[in-house]
Image: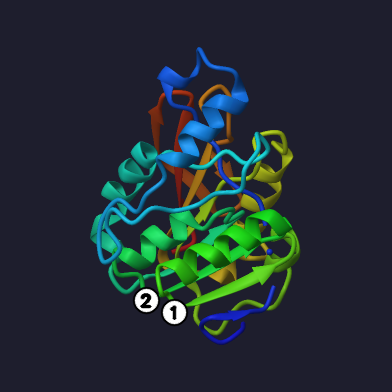
Amino acid sequence: MGAPGLDTGVPNDRSSSLGWFEIWDSTTANSAILSLMRVIAGQFRSRTLDAPAGVATRPTSDRLRETLFNVLAPRIQSARFLDLYSGSGAVGIEALSRGASHVTFVEKAPPALTTLRANLINLNISSSFTIHTGAVTAFLRNPAPAQPFDIVFLDPPYDLAAEYSTVLNLLGSSASSFLAPQSIVIAEHRKKDTLADAYGTLTRTRILQQGDAALSFFSNLSD
């Protein structure tokens, strides 16, 4: 694993929908969502974030991020956070803002990587993170880090639904050493898309739904 702040390797961006955008065409709705992106709480509270333009990038809404981190609040301080399919970095940056000790971003899309790096620069974040540029599956097939992750978040592009089962199965089997004891894995997905209740040693313990999006929480049965 690279040193904090070192680009060592991955791209994409997240998705979700806000109900009142649904009557707009997708380009207008996406532009409006991007203009509202901000850090919700913590050190960088209310600071705005950029995201790659275009309908291919669908950032996690502020409201859904707030819901996610309300759940994670008891465990985010000093946590090691893995942000898979990082996109603009909004989720990982929120984790840093709220006290995570280190965030590893994994993203492969050049436009998303450019925006991710710009967001970190604009917030003067120069340490406590690593960027891996490449595919998430390739990252998880590397040797496990010396310090495993307490929280893993993944939000593949919604049109790559097979990525959910592939990545969750890896984390529940050959890549389980990436997970610290008592770790938690969260997958953001469309509410209408059904995830399995178990992937290897990972079992779903909770699901939260908001608008068209859902958050599935998994814990490691082997702990």
Q: Secondary structure at mark 2?
A: loop
Whether pointer 2 and pointer 1 mark residues with C-beta atoms closer than 8 Å, the reply is: yes
Mark sitting earlier along the chain (2/1): 2
Viewer-side label of 2, 1? 1
Within 10 angstroms of label 1, few (less than 14), some, or many (20 or more) residues? some
Q: Secondary structure at mark 1?
A: loop
Hey, which quadrant is residue 223 in on the image?
bottom left
Within 10 angstroms of label 2, few (less than 14), some, or many (20 or more) residues? some
Hey, which quadrant is residue 194 in on the image?
top right
The answer to whether any part of residue 130 appears in the image is yes
Q: What is the x, y in percent for residue 119? A: 49, 62
Residue with the mark numbered 2: 101
Q: Label 2 vs label 1: CA separation? A: 6 Å
Q: Amino acid at mark 1?
A: Ser
What residue is at 35 percent from the left and 70 percent from the top? 100
Nearest the viewer among 31 and 102 is 31
Q: What is the x, y in percent for residue 174? A: 68, 65
Q: Amino acid at mark 2?
A: Ser
Nearest the viewer among 42 and 26 is 26
Quarter holding the N terminus? bottom right
What residue is at 56 percent from the left and 25 percent from the top? 28
What's the image's color scheme? rainbow
Does 217 sit above or below residue 49? above
Which label belongs to residue 128?
1
